[in-house]
Image (cartoon, rainbow, N blue to C red):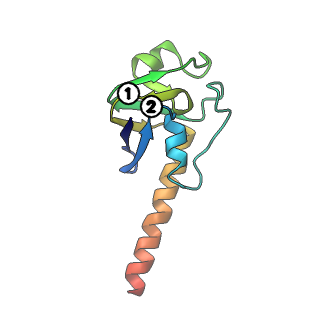
Amino acid sequence: MRYRVTIENCSETYPCSEQQTLLQGMEQLGKRGIPVGCRGGGCGVCRVQVTSGTFSKAKMSRSVISEADESKRIVLACRCTPTSDLSISVVGKMQKALSAQRLIETEDDVSVAAVG
């Protein structure tokens, strides 16, 4: 089954199946600058906070996701799969990449508007 995942930081939405991790779905967007680390739950680069919806998660390193993080629904996108439509907020290093990408897209829109 395919679910809709909304990234609140940039209002981007992408499809993600329950056989894909949130990170794999995100990579299919084709955005440059999405940082990818170990893909195994140990580096913490792909931290996200699930703000709505349900998900399943695989083992993640306690050095990057604490019990307190988990209680706030902060997980690693590389170790999390959707079980319903989700809204997520990107935190940490990935947040910087999405913010930079959004700034580039906004500048491109302004350039096109100025030329048109």
Residue type beneath disc 1: Thr
Residue 83: assigned label: 1
Residue 29: assigned label: none
Q: Is residue 41 above or below residue 22?
A: above
| Residue matched to label 2 | 18
Binning the other alpha carbons within 10 Å of mark 2 as few (below 14), some (14 to 19) or many (20 upward) gives: some
Residue toward you, 8 or 59: 59
Looking at the rendered structure, the secondary structure element under dot 1 is: loop
Q: Residue at x 57, y 40 (%)?
A: 93
Task: Point out the image quarter for the C terminus.
Answer: bottom left
* Quarter of image, res 7: top left
Q: Does residue 5 appear left or right of residue 93 in this picture?
A: left
The answer, for residue 16, to whether it is visible in the render is yes
Locate residue 24, reporting x and y percent: 54, 40
Residue type beneath disc 2: Glu
Locate residue 115, reporting x and y percent: 42, 86
Alpha carbon separation for disc pair 1 and 2: 6 Å
Say whether disc 1 or disc 2 marks the residue closer to the N-terminus.
Answer: 2
Pointer 1 with pointer 2, Cβ within 8 A: yes
Task: Point out the image quarter for the N terminus.
Answer: top left
Callout count: 2
Q: Residue at x 38, y 27 (%)?
A: 83
